[in-house]
Each structure stands twice: as C-alpha cells, then as structure tokens.
Amino acid sequence: MLLNKFCGYSLPVRFEPTELTPQELELQRGARAFLRDALPQGSYEPGLGMDSGRDAAFSQQLAKYGWIGVAIPTEYGGRNGTAVDRFVITEELLRSGAPVTHHWVADRQTAPLLLKFGTEEQKRRFLPAIASAEISFCIGMSEHEAGSDLTAVRTSATRTDGGWLLNGTKVWTSNAMDSDWFVILCRTGTDPDDRHAGLSQFLVDLRTEGVTRSPIPFLDPSTHFAEVLLDNVLVPDDCVLGVIGQGWVQNTNELAYERGGPDRWLSTYGLVEAFIREYPEEAKAEQPAQVIGEIVAKYWALRRLSLSVARSIDRKEAPAAESALVKEMGTRFEQDVIIALQCLLDVEPRSTSASVFERLLSRAILSGPSFTIRGGTIEILRSVAMKGLVL
Ligand SMILES: Cc1cc2nc3c(=O)[nH]c(=O)nc-3n(C[C@H](O)[C@H](O)[C@H](O)COP(=O)(O)OP(=O)(O)OC[C@H]3O[C@@H](n4cnc5c(N)ncnc54)[C@H](O)[C@@H]3O)c2cc1C
C-alpha cells in the first residue's frame, strides 16, 4: 500500500503487503516450542510487554538458543538473521508475557546502533556481550527540559585529556537502576543557532565515578525509571559512539529502531488471553464476543503493518514515518484494550488477586497511560508521520 498524496501533501509512506516465509514460520514454531518448555503456563508471573520483568538468567537462557542478538552478524556472536526473524521471536516472547526487560533495550536498539555507527573495536567489545545477555543497556535521551524536543538537550560533554567530561542530568531513564551501560545524547557544540549540529552520543558505564542514579517511583509504585546525574564523568575516547557532532542523525536512527515493532502493540495482549481463559462463558456472550472480535481484527491489521516495517528494514530502507504510524496506532490500541476489557466485567482489579487477569488488569490500568508517552508521544509521532521525517 503506497499512500503518496494526502490533502495535496506528498507523503512517502509505504506499507508493502508481506507474509512470513516457510523458514520464518519454522522459526516461529521453534520459538513457541522453546517457550512452552522454558516457561510452562503457571510457572511464572506473566507481564505486560517489554516491562514484563527482569530475569537475567532467563535472558541468558534465551541467548544460548540464539533468540537474542538475532540480527547481529555471527562474527559478533549473533545469529546473522533478519529484522523479520527478530520480529517473529519478539512477537512470541511478548505474547507469552515472558520476562524480557533485562535484554530489551540492548537487543532492540543498542546493537543495531553499534552495528551502524560503532567502531570495529566497539562492535567486538559490546555485541557478543549483548548477544549473550551479559550486559544490559538503557536509554539516556530525555532531560527535564528536553523530552519531545531533544535539540534542547543540555547535558554537556567537553574535551579533556584522553576523553570527554560529562555533566548534566538525564531523567525518566527506564531500568537505569539495574542496567550496566547507557547510550547518552550530549551537547558537544556551543553554537546556539544550530542546536542539531552540536549533539553527540557516548557509551557510558553506569558504574563510573560521578554517575548517581536516583529511582523515581512509578504509579504502581515500582522503580521503573530513574534520574541519572553526571558530575564530571570521564568518558574515554573509545566510548565516543559514531562521530562527534552527528548525534542528531544517529539518535534519529535509534528512535526508528525503537518504534514500529511488536512491543508497541502487544503490551496488553496477555490481558485478552487471560480474559478468555478465565471467563470462557462470559467471552462467548454477544457483547464480549463483539469486543473481542474487534480487538482481534485490530491485532491482525497492526501486525501486518508492523511486519511490513520489519521487511522494509531488511531492504535497508529507513521506515521512520511508517514506524511512527505503527507506534501511534499501536499504543492507542493497547490503551483501548484495557478500557474495553474493564467495561466487560464488574471487577475492582487487585494486584494481589488470585486471578491472573485481575493482576494484569490492575497493572495495565496503572502503566497504560505511559504507553503513548514513552518512545515519543502521539503528538510527536503524528508530526513525524505527517512530515515523513524523524524529528
Ligand atoms: C514509562 C516511561 C519510560 C520512559 N523511558 C525513557 C528512557 O528510558 N529514556 C529516555 O531518555 N526517556 C524516557 N522516557 C521519557 C519520554 O521519552 C518523554 O517523557 C517523552 O519524550 C515526552 O517528553 P516530556 O515528558 O518532556 O514531555 P514534553 O515534551 O514536555 O511534552 C508534554 C506534552 O506536550 C506535547 N508536545 C510537546 N511538543 C509538541 C509539539 N511540538 N507538537 C505537539 N505537541 C507537543 C507532548 O505530546 C506532550 O503531550 C520515558 C517516559 C515514560 C513515561
């Protein structure tokens, strides 16, 4: 589907129809069989999407089967697969509510970023450790005055002997308390008239002297994210990622990896399954059947769009506008699912309930509002899609 004219605007948005090949379906069967063995139903607490929980041992078990670092070349410890292979495995992990948080960011965006912009030495140092789930990464973009508008980033990196000195504060850094490293966006230029040109990315070990991580309580009230203070943090030259001054372009690439995948429309899938499993009779009644039918139709449509984005990445295209559209529609849908299911049952969900559905629902109600904010708000995504650019 090519939508190239809309109200007189030229929109370079392309969603090519695509299906899984027999080899990809085989991979899907393998992932399902693995999850049936590794996580039998009832043996673990299912979670919601990428925030399902942190279990380094489980991530390392996945890595042994080659389910992490799927698209990393074999010379760097990966499987040398495609973005669609990663899509297939990701979809199965999210559908089952598996604890994927430990490896999520590194696998989804740090690895492709390193492959595209990292030095040979950085690839050899970090990619095998990511593919084996030995190290975890988080994302150091947002600041108090720079969320949607990353050109307002003020955390500075100034030249010093043998490296760079970082000073500033990052905020809303998901999983910063438990992660090993982060990729941070800093200001290296001083020209106030060119806020795009003066940005650069660095790889920072979160245990470096001068880094202070302070948890920010979330609504539920886990400590999902944190504030990260950097006080004269020395980053050696070999941890500059890409080119000094090219941070804006590199960060734009990183955001494209962050959007458009199954994690942007499957966060509440487990809720639907738990509802059908726990209320089989109620689910068959006319009104719930209508609601579930509509939900299934939307899963199907979103899945096709998202799969098409993965195929486009494999063609070495840059589907920034398409990814933004998938995230805009996908995350709003994830929230609609919560409301639709809440309306079907007269229950006050408790996080301590014996019912999986109730536990998931209570968590979804508290975390659902963040789905349309994290990774770019819906207003920003609409703007990206409209311009066919990544802001
Ligand atoms: C659960 C969660 C996890 C997160 N994890 C991370 C993380 O790991 N790393 C990280 O760096 N950040 C993270 N963030 C931060 C997130 O990326 C920002 O919250 C988001 O980009 C919005 O920035 P802001 O909060 O500063 O809001 P603002 O940019 O101040 O926006 C406030 C409102 O104004 C609207 N708005 C802003 N600019 C425009 C515009 N130009 N046009 C129209 N409307 C506009 C926005 O859509 C929004 O509704 C996370 C956030 C959440 C909620």
Image: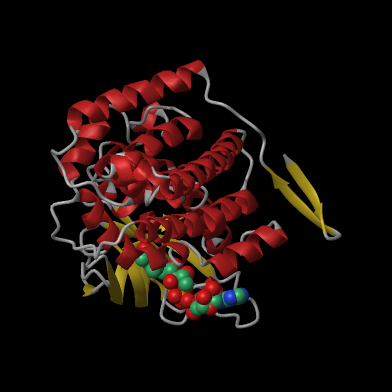
Q: Nearer the viewer, residue 274 or 364?
A: 274
In the image, residue 105 above or below residue 391: above
Report if residue 163 is visible in the image. Answer: no
Quarter placement of the C terminus = bottom right
Coordinates of residue 219 in the picture (x, y in percent): 27, 72
Coordinates of residue 98 in the picture (x, y in percent): 26, 42
Residue occupying the far right of the picture: 8
Q: Is residue 316 left or right of residue 349?
A: right
In the image, residue 320 above or below residue 307: below
In the image, residue 22 above or below residue 31: above
Q: Nearer the viewer, residue 287 or 65?
A: 287
Coordinates of residue 329 in the picture (x, y in percent): 55, 55
Q: Nearer the viewer, residue 125 or 341?
A: 341
Q: Is residue 206 left or right of residue 196?
A: left
Q: In percent of the image, x 60 and y 83: which residue is there? A: 192
Quarter placement of the N terminus = top right
Q: In percent of the image, x 33 and y 22: which residue is there? A: 30
Coordinates of residue 140 in the picture (x, y in percent): 38, 65
Q: In percent of the image, x 61 and y 29: which residue is there? A: 18
To which quarter of the image does residue 286 belong?
top left
Report if residue 330 is visible in the image. Answer: yes
